[in-house]
Image: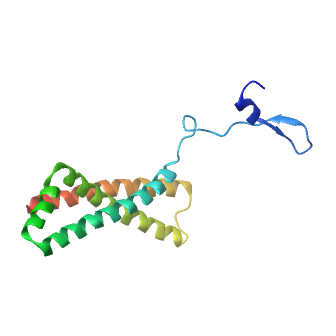
Amino acid sequence: MTDVREALMVGRASDGRLVRRPLSPHLQIYRWPLSMATSILHRVSGVALAVGTLLLVWWLAAAAASDDAYATVSWFLRSWLGVICLLGWIAALWYHFLNGIRHLVWDAGFGFAKPQIDSSTYFVLGATAALTLLTWIALFTQL
């Protein structure tokens, strides 16, 4: 054996003879299923909601504190970084909400067939994009 990988591929069958085992798939070979990516995105959106809630608390505390504190928060929220944070927060809110409803349907025992999982995934992603866009249109037409 000239290589560590060669040593890792050697194993024994149940009768004791030596066999070559395949290596586990790695990121260049393995393709994530969409359901796994959306599961990870659900967790990420939960973290984004927590961070966005801290931003909301900062805004409310500044509004209660003083005009200068509110002006600072208002300046940040109107900056390019603040707008990106607000857009991400709204998208995370819609995604987490819609995917949570999908999980409630699954908890009731429905929608576990592969075509239903795929269609509900595409629905959640599309509805998140559409509702985020509609929310931003509604917000900017009010300004």
128 up-or-down from 109: above or below: above
Q: What residue is drawn where x is 41% and y is 57%?
A: 44
Looking at the image, the residue that sits furthest to the right is 15
Q: Which of 1 and 98 is in front in this view?
A: 1
Q: Nearer the viewer, residue 110 or 93?
A: 93
Q: What residue is drawn where x is 56% and y is 58%?
A: 113
Looking at the image, the residue that sits furthest to the bottom is 64
Q: Which of 16 and 65 is in front in this view?
A: 65
Q: In which quarter of the image is residue 91?
A: bottom left
Tag count: 0
59 up-or-down from 140: above or below: below
Rendering coords of residue 102 (x, y %) = 45, 65
Rendering coords of residue 52 (x, y %) = 29, 63
Is the C terminus in the top left, top right, bottom left or bottom right quadrant? bottom left
Q: What residue is drawn where x is 52% and y is 73%?
A: 108
In the image: residue 11, left or right of residue 123: right
Is the N terminus in the top left, top right, bottom left or bottom right quadrant? top right
Rendering coords of residue 116 (x, y %) = 50, 58
In the image: residue 106, left or right of residue 5: left
How did the renderer colour the structure? rainbow
Q: What residue is drawn where x is 12% and y is 66%?
A: 69
Q: Quadrant of residue 120?
A: bottom left
